[in-house]
């Protein structure tokens, strides 16, 4: 299979690239940081094609994909993994620029990538789109405002794709993890505040990028008559609390 992974320069995407290549597949590893992708390419060899791509630069997406070498054109699996959270402030104190960046990356970029890749999958009668959601898309929490909303969009977009793709043989899945450590997610969210980022995982055993990679490989390796609509994953240390009630 040829697997195109966005956000492959770090975290889940990097672990997925390693796992897919180790399982004998070919990976197009897309992200903005060329040097990270180059290091991954030298580690993984000819099974990995680095692709410099900013998913928010939506006008570039069709031409960047059209310029792939002919032997890399037939994308069997698209993993829309590039994404980020910015900030944990309440909505009324949040940066509008941060909100725009989350929407541009987690939603607009994901939608444009899907739009670029889907027609060829439908024409071939086969393909799989795996979108990275989050528990934040299902369960609200303080400071989750636009990040959670972008992930709820991902959930519904994936299900609506399924409705449109009836009879085409093309499959779509949302993978929605909870607390995951060992990636750059919290460093990005806390804008380089290493101690705030580390506190998120203090005294926990979070899900790892490797756990996510193995789950993604499992979904992609299932027989073609099975569609996983949605998987929600949490570490055992994470569970639910009651509703917050403000008492005057
Ligand atoms: P990381 O920050 O480690 O990785 C994010 C990746 O996205 C990087 O490779 C980054 O690469 C890439 N990226 C960001 N913006 C763009 C862009 N504009 N264009 C292309 N690539 C971009 O985070 P994770 O691996 O933890 O997260 C991956 C996905 O999983 C995200 O969608 C996140 O929301 C989701 N998720 C994460 C959870 C967690 O707890 N970690 C839990 C649930 C979901 P570069 O900077 O080089 O472009
Ligand atoms: C990442 C999980 O709980 O930080 O999507 O929003 S959380």
Image (cartoon, helix red, strand yellow):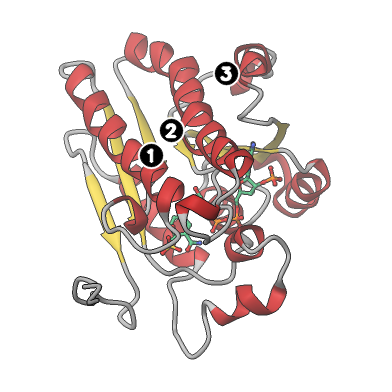
**In the visual, does 123 lie left or right of 89?**
left
The x and y percentages for residue 227 are: 20, 38
Identify the residue position indicated by label 3 in the image.
73
* Residue in view at x 64 percent, y 64 percent: 190
* Residue in view at x 23 percent, y 16 percent: 168
Near mark 2 (Cα within 10 A), the count class, few <14, some 14-19 or many ≥20, is many
- Gap in angstroms between the C-alphas marked 3 and 1: 18 Å
Image position of 150 with respect to 65: above or below: below
The x and y percentages for residue 25 are: 52, 41
Image position of 216 with respect to 168: above or below: below
The disc at residue 77 is 2
Image position of 158 with respect to 132: above or below: above
Residue 1 vs residue 245, the one in the foreground: 245
Image position of 69 with respect to 5: above or below: above
The disc at residue 130 is 1
| Mark 1–mark 2 CB contact (< 8 Å) | yes
Residue 120 vs residue 185, the one in the foreground: 185
- Residue 157, image quadrant: top left
- Residue 214, image quadrant: bottom left
- Gap in angstroms between the C-alphas marked 1 and 2: 8 Å
| Mark 3–mark 2 CB contact (< 8 Å) | no
**In the visual, does 6 lie left or right of 38?**
left
Quarter of the C terminus within the rendering: bottom left
* Residue in view at x 55 percent, y 31 percent: 104
The disc at residue 195 is none
The x and y percentages for residue 238 are: 32, 78
* First of labels 1, 2 by sequence position: 2
- Gap in angstroms between the C-alphas marked 3 and 2: 12 Å
Q: Quadrant of ligand 2?
A: bottom left
Residue 194 vs residue 53, the one in the foreground: 194
* First of labels 3, 1 by sequence position: 3
């Amino acid at each position: 299979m040829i697997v195109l992974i966005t956000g492959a320069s770090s975290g889940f995407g990097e672990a997925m690239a390693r796992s897919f290549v180790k399982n004998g597949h070919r990976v197009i590893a897309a992200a903005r940081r060329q040097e990270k992708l180059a290091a991954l390419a030298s580690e993984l060899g000819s099974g990995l094609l680095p692709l410099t791509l900013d998913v928010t630069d939506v006008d570039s997406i069709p031409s960047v994909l059209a310029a792939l070498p002919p032997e890399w054109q037939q994308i069997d699996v698209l993993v829309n993994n590039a994404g980020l959270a910015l900030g944990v402030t309440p909505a009324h104190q949040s940066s509008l620029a941060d909100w725009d960046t989350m929407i541009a990356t987690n939603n607009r970029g994901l939608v444009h990538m899907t739009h670029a890749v889907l027609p060829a999958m439908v024409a071939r009668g086969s393909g799989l789109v795996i979108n990275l959601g989050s528990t934040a898309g299902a369960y609200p929490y303080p400071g989750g405002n636009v990040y959670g909303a972008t992930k709820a969009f991902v959930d519904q977009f994936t299900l609506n794709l399924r409705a449109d793709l009836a009879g085409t043989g093309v499959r779509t899945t949302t993978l929605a993890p909870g607390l995951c450590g060992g990636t750059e997610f919290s460093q990005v969210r806390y804008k380089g505040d290493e101690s705030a980022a580390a506190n998120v995982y203090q005294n926990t055993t979070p899900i790892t990028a490797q756990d996510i990679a193995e789950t993604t490989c499992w979904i992609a390796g299932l027989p073609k008559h099975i569609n996983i609509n949605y998987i929600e994953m949490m570490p055992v240390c994470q569970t639910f609390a009651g509703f917050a009630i403000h008492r005057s």
